[in-house]
Amino acid sequence: MANYYNRGKAYGDLISCWESDIVFEAVMELTKRGIPCLTVYDSFIVPLQYKDLVDSMKDTTPYVDRRGILNALLKVDNYDGN
């Protein structure tokens, strides 16, 4: 984990985008299933009967690099203070 700290604002912004993309992957899947949902940051508001499904999705939804963020993320490295 130490490699991910102190890399600067740009790196933090990319991680934040990455997290948002994972949330929206889950939202797209819920929408395909006809399950209404709202998000608040990385939390989901769904009808109670879908709680277990959403809890499972939070742990298993893969990241899909639809915007090329992973390539940008791998290029950001100002850990050495630059």
Image (spheres, grey):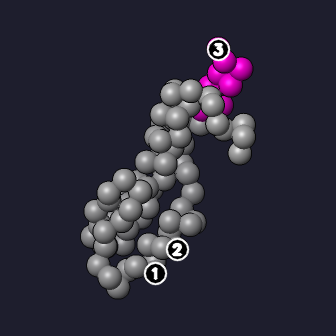
Residue that mark 1 sits on: 52
| Residue nearest the viewer, comparing 56 with 8 | 8
Instruction: For marks 3 and 2, give the CA distance.
Output: 40 Å
The range drawn in magenta is 71-82
Number of residues whose C-alpha sits closer than 10 Å to that of mark 2, classed few (under 14), some (14–19) or many (20 or more):
few
Instruction: For marks 1 and 2, give the CA distance.
Output: 6 Å
Q: Residue at x 72, y 40 (%)?
A: 2
| Residue nearest the viewer, comparing 73 with 65 | 73
As shown in the figure, which amino acid type bears the numbered disc 2? Ser
Q: Position of residue 71 (x, y in %)?
A: 61, 31
Name the mark nearer the viewer: 1 or 3. 3
Q: Is residue 36 above or below residue 16?
A: below
Residue that mark 2 sits on: 56
Q: Position of residue 21 (x, y in %)?
A: 45, 48
Badge 1 vs badge 2, beta-carbon distance below 8 Å = yes
- Badge 1 marks a residue whose secondary structure is helix
Relative horizontal placement of residue 46, taking residue 57 as reference (left or right): left
Is residue 27 shown in magenta?
no
Instruction: For marks 1 and 3, give the CA distance.
Output: 45 Å
- Badge 2 marks a residue whose secondary structure is helix
User: Mark 1 or mark 3: which comes first in sequence?
Assistant: 1
| Residue nearest the viewer, comparing 22 with 7 | 7
Is residue 77 shown in magenta?
yes
Residue that mark 3 sits on: 82
Number of residues whose C-alpha sits closer than 10 Å to that of mark 3, classed few (under 14), some (14–19) or many (20 or more):
few
As shown in the figure, which amino acid type bears the numbered disc 1? Asp
